[in-house]
Image: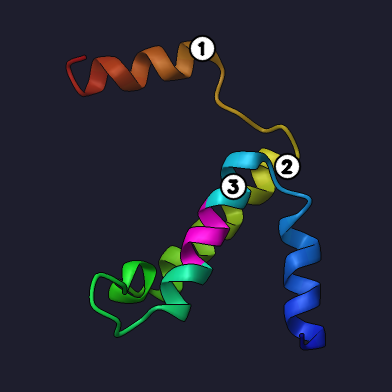
Amino acid sequence: MTKLLEQAIAEIRKLSDAEQDRAAELLLGLVHQGEEGGGGAADYQLTPEQIERVRLGLAQARRGEFADPQEIEELWRQFGL
C-alpha cells in the first residue's frame, strides 16, 4: 500500500460510519471503473467548485456548525414543505 493511500485511509477512519461507507463506495467505484455493473463514483465527476463546497461542509460539520432548528423550519417553508 502506498503512503498516500495509507494517509487517506487513516483520515477516513476518523469519519463517522456513514461517511466511511460513502468513502468506501467511492473507492470501490474507482477500482471497478469500466467493469460491467461497476463504475459507480467513476461515472460522475464533481466540479472543482462542488469539491470545495463539500470540503467546506465537512469542515463545518467537524466544528459542530449546524443550522439551528429555526433556520431549518424557514428552509422547509421556502420549499413549501
Q: Residue drawn 31% across and 72% down?
A: 38
Bounds of the magenta segment: 22-26
Which amino acid type corresponds to the residue marked 1 in the rendered image?
Answer: Pro
Q: Are marks 2 and 1 in contact (CB under 8 Å)?
A: no
> Residue 69's spot in the image, x, y percent?
51, 12
> Residue 19's spot in the image, x, y percent?
59, 47
Q: Which residue is mark 3?
A: 19
Q: Quadrant of the N terminus?
A: bottom right
Which amino acid type corresponds to the residue marked 2 in the rendered image?
Answer: Arg
Residue 40 horizontal side relative to residue 64, left or right: left
State whether the magenta stretch is mostly helix, strand or loop: helix
The image shows residue 55, relative to residue 76, as above or below, that is below
Which amino acid type corresponds to the residue marked 3 in the rendered image?
Answer: Glu
Q: Nearer the viewer, residue 15 or 67?
A: 15
The image shows residue 71, relative to residue 23, as above or below, that is above
12 in magenta? no
Q: Residue drawn 56% across and 59% down?
A: 23
Q: Which residue is mark 1?
A: 69
Extreme residue toward the front, this view: 36
Q: Which residue is mark 2?
A: 62
Dot 2 or dot 1: first in sequence order is: 2
Residue 68 horizontal side relative to residue 9, left or right: left
> Residue 55's spot in the image, x, y percent?
59, 59
